[in-house]
């Protein structure tokens, strides 16, 4: 899926239902200059995602919410 998405520098990418952040971290590693936002309704899961991103040395925005608010996040 990462190859199909082919993230590029400068893009903004929203990972809806990001869970513990594994795919968001892969996206950021593939395109360090991209803005990656992980969205999930579960704050406990987002805490795990944030810890994994810190351990991986990547900066990702983590947002708590549901998919119907995604248009507001990327503004």
Image: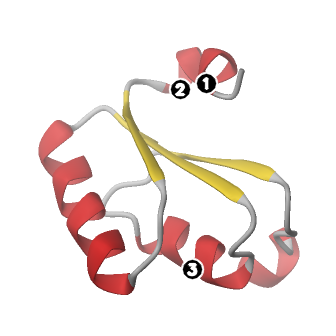
Q: Secondary structure at mark 3?
A: helix
The alpha-carbon separation of the residues under discs 3 and 2 comes to 21 Å
Query: Crowdedness of circle 2 by 10 Å Cα count: few (<14), some, many (20+)?
Result: some
Query: Crowdedness of circle 1 by 10 Å Cα count: few (<14), some, many (20+)?
Result: some
> Residue at 43% across / 24% down in the picture?
66
> Residue at 30% across / 32% down in the picture?
41
Q: Nearer the viewer, residue 48 or 31?
A: 31
* Mark nearer the N terminus (3 vs 2): 3
Is 72 on the left-hand or right-hand side of 67? right
Q: Nearer the viewer, residue 42 or 55?
A: 55
Is 45 on the left-hand or right-hand side of 15? left
Query: Crowdedness of circle 3 by 10 Å Cα count: few (<14), some, many (20+)?
Result: some
Comparing marks 3 and 2, which lies closer to the viewer? 3
Q: Position of residue 4 (x, y in %)?
A: 86, 75
Q: Secondary structure at mark 1?
A: helix
Q: Which residue is mark 2?
A: 67
- Marks 1/2 in contact by CB < 8 Å: the verdict is yes
Q: Which residue is mark 3?
A: 26
Query: In the picture shown, does residue 64 fall above or below 62?
Result: above
> Residue at 57% across / 79% down in the picture?
26
Q: Which residue is mark 1?
A: 70
Q: Position of residue 1 (x, y in %)?
A: 72, 76
Q: Secondary structure at mark 2?
A: helix
The alpha-carbon separation of the residues under discs 1 and 2 comes to 5 Å
């Amino acid at each position: 899926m990462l190859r199909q998405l082919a993230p590029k520098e400068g893009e903004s990418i929203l990972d809806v239902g990001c869970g513990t952040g594994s795919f968001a971290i892969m996206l950021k590693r593939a395109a360090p200059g991209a803005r990656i936002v992980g969205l999930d309704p579960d704050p406990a899961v987002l805490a795990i995602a944030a810890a994994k991103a810190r351990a991986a040395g990547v900066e990702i925005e983590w947002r708590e919410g549901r998919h119907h608010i995604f248009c507001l996040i990327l503004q």
